[in-house]
Image (cartoon, rainbow, N blue to C red):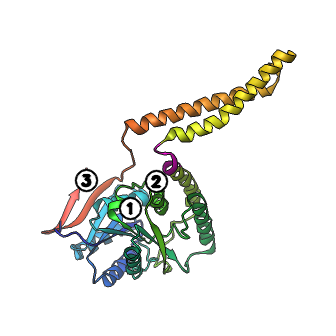
Amino acid sequence: MSENPPFLSIVIPVFNESKCIGTVNEELLDVLTETSFEIVYVDDGSVDGSGEMLKNIQSKYPDKVSVIFLYGKNGKALAQQAGIMYAKGAFIVFMDGDGQDDPNDIHGLLEAMEGEDAHMVVGRRRKRRSPWYYRAMSAFFNAFIRLISGLNIKDSNASLKIVRREILKNIPIYAGHYRFLPFLFHANGFKVIERDVEHRCRIDGVSKYGIGKVIGGMWDTLTVLFLTRSYLSPLHFFGGIGFLLGVPGFAICVYVTWLRLEHGYIMNRYPLLLLGILLILAGIQLVCTGLLGEMLTYSQPRLHNSPFIRSVLQNSSDGTEIEHIK
């Protein structure tokens, strides 16, 4: 591979974008003429000929373009993770392969990052070229993220972002967590800002965004919230809830015991006794879950999903290298 690493790595997940990716590549080459850069495409199991097109692009620009092929469809987050594994630049730019992101905005994001010494800059789409229901779902999602995270970013789900590579490699992303990169950076104490960018209509094809991703995003939000707030101490999370359930349950049992001793009530006829026992048992189970989580946290390394990489087309010092992953 080249001895001098590039300044920028552009990571672009691709899934069935054969009619778009050629134009996107030419735009990037035209815009980044004065910058040391590489483009890392990740073909996420495309079935429309995108893979062959990416091979042609890489053979035409072997010193600028790398292509990673994944087995099947892994999802955008794992595709991005594969791109991060092979990216060599000091800064990593994330963008989509459908042409909606304008490469001309990359310089502005980079200037904002260096000017304000930020660790991540998110592109805030000024005028979204999407149907109203997409915009409504995105607005709801962003409002929810601001509410739970305290991060004042209005468009955290924007695809165009720039991050510092040395920080990103220590924040693994999986499942749908690419949506939460600003949240994850912010939760770990890094500076996240946003700047206005252009948002264009798709060059061609069909959007992959829909109601299913919104529903999935809600579950991913809860997962990320738990991981960022309670991962290092699961007992604090589960134990706190267990305490809130167990104490009222214990108080109820004390009360029904008093009723039995003082008034001779036959308490098995009263649902209050069952409620108290249920709350105590639930509290004990949650505390035990927290203790088990503590044991796993301190005895096992972090385990995350990894992308299934089939092969890599990558620039090397003596031409194109084909690396097969088994």
Q: Is residue 201 left or right of residue 26?
A: right
Which part of the image, by quadrant, shows the N terminus? Answer: bottom left
Callout 1, which amino acid?
Answer: Gln
* Residue named by callout 1: 80
Give residue 69's position: percent from left, percent from top: 32, 60
The circle on residue 175 is 2
* Residue named by callout 3: 325
Q: Is residue 185 left or right of residue 226?
A: left
* Range covered by the magenta-colored residues: 226-232
Cα–Cα gap, marks 1 and 3: 17 Å
Q: Quadrant of residue 316?
A: bottom left
Around disc 2, counting alpha carbons within 10 Å, would you say few (fewer than 14), some (14 to 19), or many (20 or more)? Answer: some
Disc 3 to disc 2: CB gap under 8 Å: no
Mark nearer the N terminus (3 vs 2): 2
Cα–Cα gap, marks 3 and 2: 22 Å
Callout 3, which amino acid?
Answer: Ile
Above/below status of 182 relative to 25: above
Callout 2, which amino acid?
Answer: Ala
Q: Quadrant of residue 191?
A: bottom left
Give residue 108's position: percent from left, percent from top: 41, 80
